[in-house]
Amino acid sequence: SMSLEEEATLVGHTERVWAVAWSLRGELASASGDGVVRIWGKSPSGWACKQVLEEHSRTVRSVAWNLEGDALACSSFDGTVSVWKRSGDSELELEDGIEGHENEVKCVAWDSDGTLLATCSRDKSVAIWEVKSNGDIECQEQLTGHTQDVKCVVWHPSDRMLVSTSYDDTVKVWSERDEGEWSCIQTLASHTSTVWQASFEKFPAAHQEPAPYPTTGSASNPRMVTCSDDMTLKIWNADYVGGTIKWRNSCTLTGFHTRTIFGVDWGRAGLIATACGDDTIRIFQERTMDVDDGTCGFDLVCSKEGHLSDVNCVRWNPEDLTQLASCSDDGTIKIWRFRGP
Amino acid sequence: NMTDLINPAPEIFRPADLVRTEGVFDDEETPEEVDALEVFELIRGIRDPEHPNTLEQLHVLEADRVEVDNKKGKVKVWMKSTVTHCSQATLIGLCVRVKLMRSLPQRFKVDIYMVPGTHDQEAGVNKQLNDKERVAAAMENENLMNIVNSCLTPLSV
């Protein structure tokens, strides 16, 4: 059978850990209610905290590495975003800050080029920031439309498209119509409570082996998964109608989670992992054979009560496809290995 | 100024005479067991933000509207609003949540709801009280926490 085996527990934060993010160099950044960001790395003697970033005066809610792993953005309840950079293997140094939201910045995300940052806030807005080559950061656009807090922003892996999820129970899809001009192209209103996160389907990179758990999706047209306080996961397919993209809820996974689903990650191995308020990490695999009409093509293949309190975030390692990181209200981060049959 | 109060003349109730059944949860093996009455005792003395009364005296909280499931680690509290348009409901609910967060073992999941039909913004209040990110942000708001902490300070008799 399939299992999650614990490889390490990372202890150091003194409050709940809200988010973790892998760099392509195999390091992990973590954001906590204790107001600091920790950078963790694996050495021959095991996992250790390599650096502590102390810049924010309140909870750090989210962290995001750029593609190269030489820049890290952190968003905080103090209303700001800090951007850190490094050259080579040196320590991260504070490069710039973003002040523009009225209150808590709940999420920050780099686009695939590392030139744009997206942020979202309790002020109900989504903002897009241009990171100039000289390090300056300028607001490109502030997007309004959500009627409540915006919980999460995620970039499409290849297209100039951004997805935001909100306390207003909707998901909004934003697209760049003209250079630097963004607008909402679709509002997805299927969830019945707060949508906490979204994640796009991912595939192995060119230098990697094929996905160990293949899916029916394609890298050129990835699907999306959203998770909600309504205790469901929703899978969304992108249909192209008259040259424009239309997202369609193709599948809803109901009955697996017993409390709010705070986090979801669709990894390159072809597996979907979830972080749930019932202290449990769950792994779903697509059923590529015998998909009956109308039934959901995803199976729960592993369920692990991995923490002593709510699990807030799960992230698959993009370079080590079956390795998973999780973090929790219990103050710990755990590294897991998913083992198939 | 009494005319500014949401409910200027609330009905005051006498605190209930509650007797704990001794020895029910004194199993050495499970020291973290709590019962509904124990949870009620933690929150019954919370002071209303705008009246010199406890939430129990205003019947916002009652012993039989607390539910505990030790096995599943769940605590549920239903609050009754004294008036259906009470704008203090989220603040009162925050006081109850903060008190329980500080007092209960971490393994307990706490859900706080309005008694159905007692508040005209019931769904919105319930959602806000149970969104832990909003609660966390509120708990970092110094002004708000000053009010919460004063409501959690026992009334001098």
Image: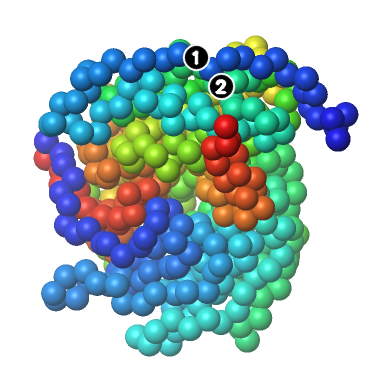
Mark nearest the camera among 2 and 1 is 1
Which is nearer the N-term, disc 2 or disc 1?
1
Question: Does residue A198 appear left or right of residue A39 in this picture?
Answer: right
Task: Tell me the residue at 43%/26% (across/down).
Answer: B41
Task: Tell me the residue at 50%/41% (across/down).
Answer: B98
Label tally: 2
Q: Position of residue A87 (x, y in %)?
A: 43, 87
Q: Position of residue B42 (x, y in %)?
A: 44, 31
Instruction: Locate the N terminus of chain A by quadrant.
Output: top left
Q: Given the image, on which type of amino acid does mark 2 rest?
A: Glu
Q: Quadrant of residue A187?
A: top right
Q: Position of residue A298 (x, y in %)?
A: 33, 31
**Could you tell me which chain the residue with mark 2 belongs to?**
B
Res. B56 mark: 2
Res. B16 mark: 1
Give the CA separation, mark 2 to mark 1. 8 Å
Crowding near the residue tagged with mark 1, few <14, some 14–19, many ≥20 C-alpha atoms within 10 Å: few
Circle 1 — which element?
A: loop
Q: Are marks 2 and 1 in contact (CB under 8 Å)?
A: yes
Colour theme: rainbow
> In the rendered image of this protein, does residue A206 appear above or below residue B138?
below
